[in-house]
């Protein structure tokens, strides 16, 4: 029999050619995910999201229960002492100190630490390991008549040590915003501080302490406050990550 000029047997063959493969098979052949694979991917994504949120929440709870978010009494007392002469302003991970009666500013970032290498000493035939405490970099500026003296320092064992001294026309705000790193490479970047005459190095250190107010109390505050602020910023990171992911 024929229908519309097409043999029945051929019509059946045409039908199988058009409708034989399943939609999932065609999708696989074309590289398009099937509905089953998409559902599996969504399920896996949901599980990954839930797992991450659970761990982030756990970490935040552990940090809060640890008591590390409470300012230690020693640090609180030191902060109160410094606030007699300094205005302390927190700006995210950066802390700024402004001297109340001079154009002197100190700033430091809670992650700008310098990890000392482990040192090994031989004593009585035994090798002993000593790990030095982390040091913290901070920047001091003194401004006058459009010029700024930049003193980049490091706090080590409660004492301020000078790494470099630079003079610039760059504003103090820009300098502290860049953590004491001057990008104007065309200008003189200052002498190698350790190659200066010893009496000149000593004079700069005295100026830093007695004129800029950067004494042992302030150096100790930089080191201690860095640990405290880094802990606070870590917990904030955990909260922000949860808010974004959920």
Image: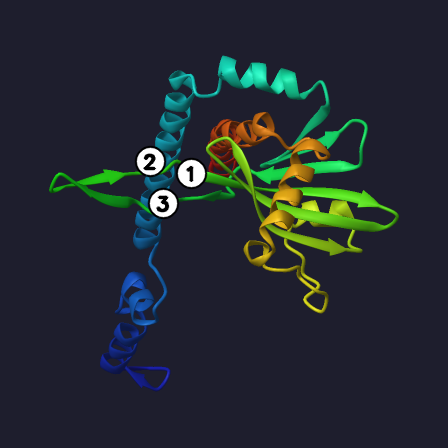
* Dot 3 alpha-carbon crowd within 10 angstroms: few under 14, some 14 to 19, many 20 or more: few
Q: Is residue 166 above or below residue 11?
A: above
Residue 191, position in %: x, y? Answer: 63, 60
From this view, report whether residue 32 is shown above or below residue 114: below
Sort mark 1 into few (<14), some (14-19) or many (20+) by Cα contacts within 10 Å: some
244 above or below 171? above
Mark found first going from the N terminus, 1 or 2: 2
Question: Whole-Å distance between the Cαs marked 3 and 2?
Answer: 10 Å
Pointer 2 residue:
51
**Which residue position holds label 1?**
134
- Is residue 129 or residue 96 the one in the foreground? 129
Q: Residue sitting at 68 percent across and 66 percent down?
A: 185
Mark 1 or 3, closer to the camera: 1
Q: Is residue 1 visible?
A: no
Name the side, left or right, on which 31 lies relative to 121.
right
Q: Are marks 1 and 3 in contact (CB under 8 Å)?
A: no
Look at 28% across and 76% down and name the residue there.
17
Camera-nearest residue between 245 and 61:
61
């Amino acid at each position: 029999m024929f229908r519309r000029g097409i043999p029945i047997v051929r019509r059946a063959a045409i039908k199988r050619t058009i409708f034989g493969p399943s939609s999932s098979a065609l999708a696989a052949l074309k590289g398009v995910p099937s509905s089953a694979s998409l559902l599996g991917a969504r399920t896996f994504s949901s599980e990954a999201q839930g797992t991450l949120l659970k761990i982030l929440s756990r970490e935040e709870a552990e940090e809060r229960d640890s008591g590390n978010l409470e300012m230690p009494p020693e640090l609180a007392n030191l902060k109160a002492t410094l606030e007699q002469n300094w205005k302390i302003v927190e700006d995210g991970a950066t802390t700024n100190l402004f001297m109340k009666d001079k154009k002197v500013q100190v700033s430091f970032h809670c992650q700008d630490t310098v990890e000392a290498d482990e040192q090994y000493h031989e004593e009585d035939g035994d090798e002993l390991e000593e790990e030095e405490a982390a040091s913290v970099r901070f920047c001091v500026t003194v401004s006058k008549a459009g010029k700024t003296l930049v003193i980049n320092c490091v706090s080590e064992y409660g004492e301020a040590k000078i790494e470099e001294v630079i003079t610039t026309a760059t504003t103090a705000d820009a300098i502290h915003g860049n953590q004491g790193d001057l990008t104007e490479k065309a200008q003189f970047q200052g002498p190698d501080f350790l190659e200066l005459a010893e009496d000149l190095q000593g004079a700069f250190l005295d100026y830093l302490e007695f004129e800029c107010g950067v004494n042992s109390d302030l150096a100790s505050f930089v080191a201690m406050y860095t640990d405290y602020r880094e802990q606070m910023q870590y917990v904030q990171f955990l909260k922000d990550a949860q808010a974004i992911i959920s």
